[in-house]
Amino acid sequence: MVETRTLEEPKRQKLPIIDCDVHNTLASERVLYPYLSKRWRRHHEMVGTPDRVGAYIPRAHLYGARYDAWPPSGQRPGSELDFLREQLLDAWHIEYGILNCLTPVCEMPNLAYAAAFARAVNDWQIENWLEPEPRLRASIIVACDDAAFATAEIERLANHPGFVQVLLLARTMEPLGRRKYWQMYETAAKHNLPIGIHFTGVGAGPITAVGRPSHYIEDHGGMTQAFQTQVTSLVCEGVFEHFPMLRVVLIEGGFAWLPPLMWRLDRAWKKLREEVPDVKRLPSAYIREHFWITTQPIEEPPKQEYFHQLLAQLDVDEKLMFATDYPHWDFDSPAHALPKSLAPALKQKIMAENARAFYRF
Amino acid sequence: MNRQTETENRRQGFVQAGLAVIDCDLHNRLPSLEMLYPYLPDYWCDYCEESGFPGPDANDYPSGVPLSIRPGLTLPSENRPASDLALLRGHALDVWDVEYGILTCAYRVQSVHNEDLAAALASAVNDWQIEHWLDREPRLRGSLIVPSQNPALAAREIERLGGHPGFVQVMLPARSQAPYGNRRYHPIYAAAVRHQLVVGIHYGGAPGLPPTSVGWPSTYLEEYVGMAQVFQAQVLSLVSEGAFDQFPDLRVVLIETGVTWMPSLMWRFDKEWRGLRGLTPWVKQPPSAYIRQHVRMTLQPIDAPPTAAELLQIVGQLDSEDLLMFSTDYPHWCFDSAEEAFPAGLPTSLARRILAENAREFYPKLR
């Protein structure tokens, strides 16, 4: 659903709701200083966190946020637990919310700094979000481009009850099936932690395969290209043959593109499978077994009939999980996001029960 | 009725009904760089000879890859697929009742970063196409190869040959250094529109950038599958940058894209536009409206779902009978027998549009 600019009057939901995409935000990177060593604090004081200079496309909204999501204090949307409680958890009676803290750790050229930054964010999440609020769960932030750093961070936190997945961003330095990421997958699978791949990122190069676009609508609307590439890469590299327990959740990527991708992959694999002997089954079989999908931003075809055709073509009713994307501008309302014509049993699964099974709440 | 008889009957049915076919994707292939020497200035012949330059190749269709040639196409051993007119007649033009076949020569001059050489090669391959294909077979039409990495030089080539009755479109590879909506390409579109040429964006290319938005994949399989996303980026760019507002007569064909992703792209793009159109106020209609008006797709490879019912759903979701244009993608392996080139179960009125009428309406020079 598109943004509503005034606070919606929430309706009491009869169904339990688990929100699989909530964003907690650093009010400023300086809030990490208590969690950074002296060496990395000094690093931050000197050079800050380098941005991808020359890759800037202005967004439609400051920080991509809903206009009404700014706390009265004026701090960044998503940075204050009390306001997030009031506006999201209490207002919508959310049973659990999964925090996906978006950071540039997988884009930092300095990998050691990225690892220190990730560790600090995770410690900040424990102290400021997980410990004070039992309805929240969080994602482990990892510097994914160094296998040793990423693995060590997963090992450090895997047994903390508040962390339920490892978070990556859709636009990475390299396609996520590549071997440099395998040790991270092995560790995550060992601890039964899913890998979450979330919308955003700038990767290593231009954000499309054909260079730099000019406008935010191409950046935002083109993100599905990165998701398609990541699914293709994970399947074609044989990741799920090597790590059969690995589970992946695609967050904020949409899903109407997935049936056509499965058809294209299956057809091409039948002709090219000699190139990828590790891929032993139809690509669509791996996809339906190993991928979960969050619903926001919900697909809005011009006819509801098409939405039902899409669900049937997807054939993953057990793997769709509701999300709001609070506090971002393209927030999906729990009351309005799913089509009215959805069967009640399926709606119940999507709103909470699929996520309950997936995250083992 | 067994499947083979059924498809054969279907084909015969179309032929007997007088449904002529326009095949919008037939590959003609330059057998060797030496074939271009008669059309190249001495300077460039010497340059190529002395450097051992074998000619541009994007490796879009590696010769050992099964997708590159349909099983059952018999070739004399000295011939590479699609490099011989007599074979192309026998394998494609005479199989269906082909009224026009549009050649899509995948000669990737864009991979040559010496832009003068790229321009010389483009001119040479176009002259070669005239002499060896267009002058010899009246059913064939051609695609102009242009050095699109330098739009000024590309426009010059369009001005040189755009008036030739055999050329009906300008060919751009799907992969490019900048998205095709970028205004640097306007000289190409202005020249194409001036000469009533369609812009054909075709599978492949080698601009020097990774073929995905997240870097280099490990396998050809990924690159092949990922080409659909490359097309998606180009469609987003063309609409968002206002190319169709700048050039109301601009017509774009997406060639060899796979077809089935288009409804999902239109839904996503329309939704994004509803939320973000304040940033691109020149995009006045929902993106899907521009796509339905200005963009067409060739049929093969169709990337069809497993069931005919699902394919009908996808075709219905396009919400238009105008978008698809018949193609065989000869000699690539999109289907097992020529009779399977056209999917079963489509309503006859739609089949008629796809087989020829859509192309006839869309290509100004085929009217």
Image (cartoon, grey):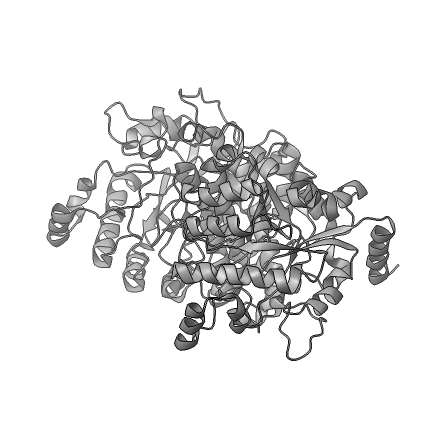
Residue B205 can be seen in this image: yes
Image coords of residue B91 (percent x, y): 73, 66
At 61% from the left edge and 37% from the top edge, which residue is drawn? B292
At 53% from the left edge and 69% from the top edge, which residue is drawn? B38
As drawn, B188 above or below B81: above
Q: Nearer the viewer, residue B352 or A77?
A: B352
| Residue occupying the far bottom of the picture | B77
As drawn, A284 above or below A94: below
Image coords of residue B131 (percent x, y): 62, 63
In terms of image quadrants, where is residue B338?
Answer: bottom right
Give the number of callouts.
0
Quadrant in which the C terminus of chain B appears: top right
In terms of image quadrants, where is residue A312?
Answer: top right
Residue B216 can be seen in this image: no
Image coords of residue B185 (percent x, y): 44, 45
As drawn, B65 above or below B350: below
User: Does residue B285 appear left or right of residue A122 in this picture?
Assistant: right
User: Does residue B29 appear left or right of residue A361 in this picture?
Assistant: right
At 70% from the left edge and 61% from the top edge, which residue is drawn? B335
